[in-house]
Amino acid sequence: MTTQNLLVELFVEELPPKALKKLGESFAGVLADQLMVQGLTSADTVVTPYASPRRLAAHISHVWLKAEDKAVQQKLMPVAVGLDAAGHPTAALLKKLGALGADVTDPATLAASLKRAPDGKAEALFYDSLVTGATLDIGLQKALDEAIAKLPIPKVMSYQLETDCELPGWSSVNFVRPAHSLVALHGTTVVPVKALGLSAGHTTQGHRFEAAVSPVVIANADAYADTLARDGAVIASFDARRAEIARQLAAAAEQVGGGCRPIEDDALLDEVTALVERPNVLVCTFEAQFLDVPQECLILTMKANQKYFPLLDAAGKLTNQFLVVSNISPADASAVTGGNERVVRPRLADAKFFFDQDRKKTLESRVTGLDKVVYHNKLGTQGERMARVRAIARVIGQQLGGETLAQAADTAARLAKTDLLTDMVGEFPELQGIMGGYYARHDGLSEDIAFAIEDHYKPRFAGDELPRNAVGVAVALADKMETLVGMFGIGNLPSGDKDPFALRRHALGVIRMLTEKDLPLDLGALVAGAVPAFGDRIADASPALTDFIYDRLAGSLREQGYSAQEVDAVLALRPQRLGQVGRLLAAVRAFAALPESPALAAANKRIGNILKKAGDVDAHVNPKLLQEPAEQQLFAAMQRFVPEANAQFESGDYTTSLQTLAVLHSAVDAFFDDVMVNAEEMDLRLNRQGLLKSLHDAMNRVADLSRLA
């Protein structure tokens, strides 16, 4: 028996565009997985998902018409329960076998199918049977039901279908959108399955306006994509349609000339791909006068509201042309371009109006308005929050650049949230900070202040750029620390996948600024320094918040490719200057590659256990009490190499510091071979513990090396 390829398609009303890609991948993936579980696919099977605004489909290669029969052995019960003293089946065994479909009337057949085998301390009975493989019609029905049930549907809708039985009536169906047809082809043969009140066939519908025929007949499973493209004017593959849109966007921009390029936005490209079945990119224009408005405003309104692709010139500045991805391809596209130009004009006019109105009031004049905006019922208004951010920013600014930076950070923090009260940010919340920067320049403030206001939300997401200047860094750190300290202080912590105040993102933002800017700020002092700004509004949750930040740092480092052992070794010491963590990790990695590393790590772990049992040990050694040659040699080696390693550590050369200490491995091995640490004489015992304590302190300045054992 040979395999054939399978095609399944659900044709529906327009699907939610932001969910389309996931819906298509889920439909094809679950369908294929369920067929595989039932043994209906082969090892060579390839799954190809299809998703367009009006269809979900999957092409699955090498599908069997019937799965192979399988020999199955099932454990029944202990022999003592299943057989009586004469070895005959008991009533319990016969009942169990009958439930499994065994023929209990023929003793010979029954005896041949039963096996006795050890099961722990006793013997058990096992039943051998042959399970008939699933047929494709039954297997596909189960797989289709499961694929539909597991679709990640954002919101289910209910609709009515007329029943196909003799009695008139309607049945209710729950699905993401009303479904109109179902295709299920195994090669050229229709598989008789049903879903959502529909019976499978071999016809579907093409483009609403440009299909060559209706309905579109799919002759066989392999002809699906080509037939839809030819007869239905539809590019069924999401990825192929996306690539075609990207190609047309680039070609249209090149046609415009001047080094123009469409704005890069993967989310927008995905959404537009989910809105069209046959993309046709057109060039449109708006009045150049609107370019007086900040380009971020124009770009946002074109992308968010109209799904247009703005065109940027070679310098990255917005032009007065944009690209539209149309779902139709008329011979004369002037009506389409003209309509889109008319639609975008009021949007741009609104943006210009908001911009002009906002500039009639200074940011300074809006400060008092923050007292009327509630931030959090336990943490007060935005005005109170702004005062806290100012206080924290002054402390950070003082540490980073003295009084000059502290004053600049205070000014920027005072004005940073005022653009929340502007019309533009009210219409486009995504522009908060950005508009504050524009309005600060209009008010005559310095570029440092304007950049700081614009950048104080950064980094807003993974990979986002950091604030551009020291003022921005101080305010951005203060803003994030205020959120973290405040939310931890009132017990508003993330749980599971819920993090409504984005505390994980804020913590990673703090980590990135401290590490990538290599700021001379201690993490503990940074957290503690933000607490006084809240007065008695919160409890001091500094230890929990510090743990949270180190946990975020550990996760981030592991994502960067460092091993769990390397990360644990470095962070076990809670380094306060996070900018040094990268160099510490590099030193640990270099140390771990040394041949002496395993022995020293194991010894370090052993020393740690000894010191833990000994309690409070003083790192002091009396050379006169060193009796054994091995302890004398270890002390001499430490006297020679530890000062050198310490000097290298103090200079920031952590790698060389650890490599210098690695030469102690032979002396350490000899010490443990020849010396009894817990000697009977108390003075000898304390002296040897002091020697180990000195060694332990020296070896663990860079990292807790025992974590590498």
Image: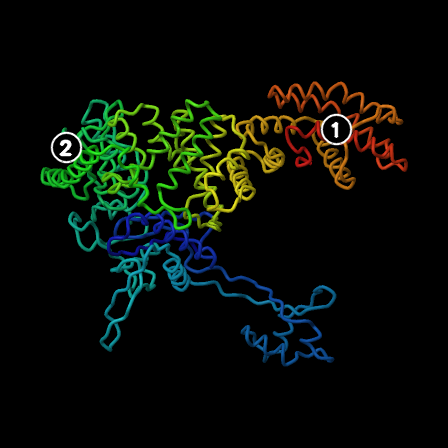
Q: Residue at x 24, y 46 (%)?
A: 275
Q: Position of residue 22 (x, y in %)?
A: 36, 49
> Do the CB atoms of the residues marked 2 and 1 lie less than 8 Å apart?
no
Foreground residue among 237 and 303: 303
Q: Quadrant of the N terminus?
A: bottom left
Q: Position of residue 134 (x, y in %)?
A: 45, 63
Name the amino acid, label 1: Leu
Asked whether the viewer can see residue 186, the reply is yes
What element does badge 2 sit on? strand
Which image quadrant for residue 196?
bottom left
Which image quadrant for residue 657?
top right
Circle 1 is placed at which residue position? 695
Q: For the residues marked 2 and 1, what is the alpha-carbon distance in whole angstroms?
A: 74 Å
Q: Residue at x 66, y 35 (%)?
A: 708
Q: Is residue 677 left or right of residue 298?
A: right
Circle 2 is placed at which residue position? 285
Q: Position of residue 642 (x, y in %)?
A: 72, 22
Give the answer, above or below, for where 505 lies relative to 219: above
Q: Is residue 53 left or right of residue 701?
A: left
Q: Tag 2: Cα neighbours inside 10 Å, few (<14), some, or many (≥20)?
A: some
